[in-house]
């Protein structure tokens, strides 16, 4: 989530200011992050604001008096997947990611994500797909369409919806097509293509990944067509 400012409001702002901000969010997560000296001290939902207005009937009341002090959050680098699942089930819409000083580093809209998995993903897309020739003579197998989109896009979208942000795709055969396919970020996630200098066989390309950000690494074929729940899969192995 790039633009954090639309969700952040000062504790000294008024309820009228908060109403204007929430109205601009429209159908988005109707939650504001309340800050003081650039540190999060509370959250404010449309329900919090409504209850305060019923009680005070004053639009010039400070946000500080209406905010929820028992807000839900996670610290960067300390992601508890089961806790996040509980937050989501309890109706938390906007989950702040904070540093140790409670400064807001990121905000995750849980209406748009199934989870936040501390996982790096590697999708292997370097094979020739010989069993599907002639379809793969001019198109790499991961870019063959099922329905209205390439097979690999189903996997990329599912990973991103599960909160996976570090995604690598290893390429070789017709590599330029896959690299072009992922030139632009997907939902603010940059898909990194890593080209093999030669065919390294199954799993051989993993050694070309320069940096992993998490301890858990998911390695999968890019042409795998699956509806696996990555959150359940992660929890079953931790």
Image (cartoon, grey):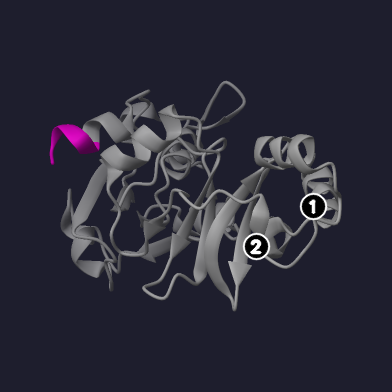
Characterize the magenta stretch by its predominant secondary structure: helix
Give the residue drawn at x 30%, y 41%: 83
Q: Which residue is mark 1?
A: 15
Which of the 4 image quadrants contains residue 49? top right
Q: Is residue 109 above or below residue 79?
A: above
Categorize mark 2 by other alpha carbons within 10 Å: few (<14), some (14-19), many (20+).
Answer: few
Q: Which residue is mark 2?
A: 4
Which of the 4 image quadrants contains residue 210? bottom left
Q: Quadrant of the C terminus?
A: top left
User: In the picture provided, is 45 more to the left or to the right than 231?
Assistant: right
User: In the picture provided, is 160 more to the left or to the right than 226?
Assistant: right
CA distance for labels 2 and 1: 19 Å
Give the residue drawn at x 17%, y 48%: 202
**Dot 2 and dot 1 residues touching (CB under 8 Å):** no
Q: Quick check: is 236 in the magenta stretch?
A: yes
Q: Position of residue 46 (x, y in %)?
A: 71, 38
Q: Nearer the viewer, residue 196 or 160?
A: 160
Q: Quick check: is 110 in the magenta stretch?
A: no
Give the residue drawn at x 28%, y 59%: 78
Magenta-drawn segment? 234-238
The mark nearer the N terminus, 2 or 1, is 2
Q: Nearer the viewer, residue 1 or 185?
A: 1
């Amino acid at each position: 989530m790039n633009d954090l400012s639309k969700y952040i409001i000062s504790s000294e702002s008024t309820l009228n200011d908060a109403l204007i901000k929430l109205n601009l969010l429209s159908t988005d997560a109707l939650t504001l992050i309340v800050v003081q000296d650039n540190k999060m001290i509370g959250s404010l939902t449309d329900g919090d604001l409504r209850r305060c207005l019923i009680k005070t009937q004053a639009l010039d009341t400070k946000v500080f008096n209406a905010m929820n002090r028992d807000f839900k959050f996670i610290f960067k680098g300390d992601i508890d997947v089961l806790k996040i699942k509980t937050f989501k089930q309890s109706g938390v819409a906007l989950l702040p990611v904070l540093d140790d000083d409670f400064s807001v580093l990121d905000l995750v809209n849980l209406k748009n994500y199934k989870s936040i998995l501390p996982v790096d993903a590697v999708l292997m897309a370097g094979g020739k797909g010989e069993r599907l020739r002639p379809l793969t003579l001019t198109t790499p197998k991961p870019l063959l369409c099922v329905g209205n989109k390439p097979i690999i896009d189903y996997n990329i979208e599912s990973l991103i919806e599960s909160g996976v942000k570090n995604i690598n795709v290893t390429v070789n055969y017709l590599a330029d097509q896959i690299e072009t396919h992922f030139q632009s970020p997907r939902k603010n996630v940059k898909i990194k293509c890593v080209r093999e200098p030669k065919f390294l066989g199954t799993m051989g390309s993993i050694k070309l990944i320069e940096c992993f950000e998490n301890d858990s690494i998911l390695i999968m074929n890019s042409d795998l067509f699956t509806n696996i729940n990555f959150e359940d899969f992660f929890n079953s192995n931790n």
